[in-house]
Image: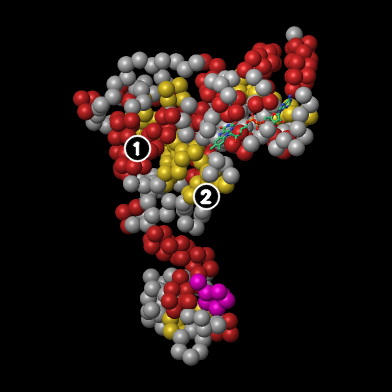
């Protein structure tokens, strides 16, 4: 223990008394003059320095003071049993041993957060014959992988996945867990967070950490995308977030990276698991790959009627892309919901996004604005889609689109 006491600059003291209230050791007094410190009581933990509006108090070593304030803050906020939770985890989601790309995107993001916090990045792989996935996770940035290789977790089921995840969390105590906002990730995150009685923010689009408090700042669009909400989980651990696919950058794969694979065994009791996987039915192919497409041509209400989606398909066929749509087009019944891009649809990040007859409502933009190149075709020069467009054509889509398709046909044969 140091016997350092807080230093007082009497000329700066305005005798407001905030420091006296803040001091947990009752070491400060105000008796008709500038604040005085009782050296026997002062623990120099910096709360007084933090609240003083005129910088009349200081600790010798400011960094030390900051650390102490932070430590004191964390201790105040977090129950003792949660204070040693450390490290960032990413759930590596697989379906038939094929990994959801969002898991790799999250390893890229997790790497950044882990480095900011000075902790390890860990992948969590649940599956059967899944060791290769664990190696792959290391190539994408994990320092360590917890692997549960068991036929019971071959296919996703809420119960055994939740049981395994919770057992790992209780044993290894991570401070942050990231999952993809996929059907599986959303289901698992909700179940795990509820059982652990911790906080979960769904559908995040931005993640940052606050160095001092180690809080994960989880930002997500709220109220139909009209505001961005930043959410903290101050009093519980782990801090859990799901993140939409294609929002974070895909990290580079490095097959020379080294890491540790730690195999864990979980005692599953199949007779207590209420669901069985009888059959897996493939989704309609085209739509299922919307979030993986490199080229998307999307149509909106400007197309006027269902049959005009043929104009979109013509261009898609020439470019080798996928058909997207606005919610207005889906709601009108012109195309199925799997094609919907946006907040309540799919988030996409293609190399090329061509928006045809789409106004660019915020709920649509949040699903496609990170595309590398955006081309907008719209007859209204004021349409907000032009705010995010790399190239814009103001004109009647019924003239522009066939002309564009024709030019591509000539160029690409
Ligand atoms: C909670 C919530 C969630 C939502 N989620 C989504 C979502 O996930 N995805 C989504 O897309 N929307 C979503 N919406 C709806 C969104 O607010 C918009 O209503 C929708 O995106 C509008 O679709 P649109 O651009 O096709 O139609 P409109 O806004 O009607 O735009 C049609 C555009 O076509 C242009 N146009 C018309 N005729 C021509 C022509 N001949 N040539 C060229 N241009 C022409 C017009 O100038 C206009 O800009 C959501 C809304 C809410 C409230």
> Which residue sits at x=65%, y=26%?
301
What residue occupies the far bottom of the structure in this picture?
32
Which of the two labelled residues, at mark 1 and mark 2, occupies the earlier sequence position? 1
Ligand 1: does it lie within 8 Å of the C-beta at label 2?
A: no
Counting from the top left corner in percent of width and height, residue 142 is at: 47, 36
> Which residue sits at x=53%, y=44%?
223
Start-end of magenta stretch: 51-57
Counting from the top left corner in percent of width and height, residue 203 is at: 49, 38
Q: Is residue 235 above or below residue 67?
A: above
Most foreground residue, 156 or 105: 156
Most foreground residue, 345 or 85: 345
Find numbered disc 1 in the image and state the secondary structure of the residue it sits on: helix
Dominant SS of magenta comes to loop
Counting from the top left corner in percent of width and height, residue 391 is at: 76, 30
The residue singled out by tag 2 in the image is 230
Residue 412 colored magenta?
A: no
């Amino acid at each position: 223990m140091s016997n350092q006491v807080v230093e007082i600059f009497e000329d700066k003291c305005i005798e407001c008394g905030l420091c006296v209230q803040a001091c947990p050791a009752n070491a400060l007094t105000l008796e008709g003059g500038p604040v005085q410190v009782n050296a026997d009581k002062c623990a120099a933990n910096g709360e007084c320095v933090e609240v003083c509006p005129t910088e009349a108090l200081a600790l010798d070593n400011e960094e030390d003071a900051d650390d102490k304030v932070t430590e004191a803050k964390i201790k105040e906020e977090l129950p003792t049993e949660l204070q040693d939770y450390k490290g960032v985890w990413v759930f590596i989601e697989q379906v038939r041993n094929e990994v959801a790309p969002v898991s790799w995107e999250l390893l890229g993001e997790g790497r950044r957060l882990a480095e900011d916090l000075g902790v390890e990045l860990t992948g969590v792989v649940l599956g059967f014959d899944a060791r290769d996935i664990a190696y792959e996770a290391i190539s994408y940035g994990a320092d360590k992988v917890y692997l549960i290789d068991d036929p019971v977790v071959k296919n996703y089921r809420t119960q055994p996945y939740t049981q395994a995840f919770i057992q790992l969390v209780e044993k290894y105590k991570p401070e942050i867990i990231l999952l993809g906002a996929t059907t599986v990730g959303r289901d698992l995150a909700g179940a795990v967070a509820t059982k652990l009685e911790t906080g979960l923010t769904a559908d995040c689009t931005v993640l940052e950490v606050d160095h001092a408090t180690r809080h994960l700042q989880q930002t997500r669009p709220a109220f139909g995308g009209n505001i961005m909400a930043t959410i903290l989980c101050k009093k519980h651990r782990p801090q859990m977030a799901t993140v939409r696919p294609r929002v974070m950058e895909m990290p580079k794969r490095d097959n020379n990276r080294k890491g540790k694979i730690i195999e864990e065994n979980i005692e599953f009791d199949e007779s207590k698991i209420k669901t069985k996987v009888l059959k897996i039915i493939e989704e309609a192919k085209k739509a299922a790959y919307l979030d993986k497409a490199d080229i998307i041509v999307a149509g909106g209400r400007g197309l006027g009627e269902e049959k005009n989606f043929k104009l979109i398909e013509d261009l898609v066929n020439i470019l080798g892309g996928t058909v997207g749509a606005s919610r207005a087009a889906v709601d009108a019944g012109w195309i199925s919901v799997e094609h919907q891009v946006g907040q309540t649809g799919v988030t996409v990040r293609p190399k090329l996004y061509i928006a045809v007859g789409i106004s660019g409502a915020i709920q649509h933009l949040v699903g496609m604005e990170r595309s590398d190149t955006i081309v907008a075709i719209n007859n209204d020069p004021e349409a907000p889609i032009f705010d995010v467009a790399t190239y814009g054509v103001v004109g009647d889509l019924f003239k522009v689109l066939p002309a564009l398709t024709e030019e591509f046909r000539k160029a690409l044969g």
